[in-house]
Image (cartoon, rainbow, N blue to C red):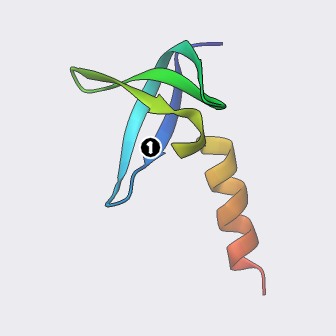
Amino acid sequence: MLPKKALWKSKDYDIPVEIIKYLGEVQGQHWVLVRSGSAETGVPLKELKFEEEARSESRRSGEK
């Protein structure tokens, strides 16, 4: 269900965003419209990390 919170894992830093809607597929990549503050932009879905994924990844990295 949208909107959904995520982290945009950009090349330089991570930006907390809210997914507003699905924009479609272009050359095999799924794109979504995201909002951060008052700005909105299109982002490839593969660049987003969801809260559940981040928690699970952090648990795995803590296990040795």
- Give the tally of numbered discs: 1
Instruction: Pick out the residue farthest to the front.
Output: 27
User: Residue at the spot x=60%, y=42% of the render?
Assistant: 46
Left/right placement of residue 26 relative to residue 12 reads: right
Residue 22 in which image quadrant: top right
**Camera-side residue: 60 or 29?**
29
User: Residue at the spot x=65%, y=65% of the render?
Assistant: 58
Left/right placement of residue 30 relative to residue 42 reads: right
Instruction: Identify whether 23 is placed above or below 42.
Output: above
Return the residue at label 1: 8
What percent of the width, then of the height, locates residue 21? 52, 12
Residue 31 in which image quadrant: top right
- Report helix, strand or loop for mark 1: strand
Instruction: Identify whether 30 is placed above or below 9.
Output: above
Instruction: Identify whether 60 is placed above or below 22.
Output: below
Q: Residues within 10 Å of mark 1 (few under 14, many from 20)?
A: many
What percent of the width, then of the height, locates residue 7? 47, 43
**Camera-side residue: 20 or 57?**
20
User: Residue at the spot x=51%, y=30% of the render?
Assistant: 5
Q: Quadrant of the C terminus?
A: bottom right
- Identity of the amino acid at label 1? Trp
What percent of the width, then of the height, locates residue 28? 66, 31
Q: Quadrant of the N terminus?
A: top right
What percent of the width, then of the height, locates residue 26? 57, 24
User: Residue at the spot x=31%, y=61% of the render?
Assistant: 12
* Observer able to see residue 37: yes
* Observer able to see residue 48: no
Instruction: Pick out the residue farthest to the left.
Output: 38
Instruction: Identify whether 22 is placed above or below 13.
Output: above
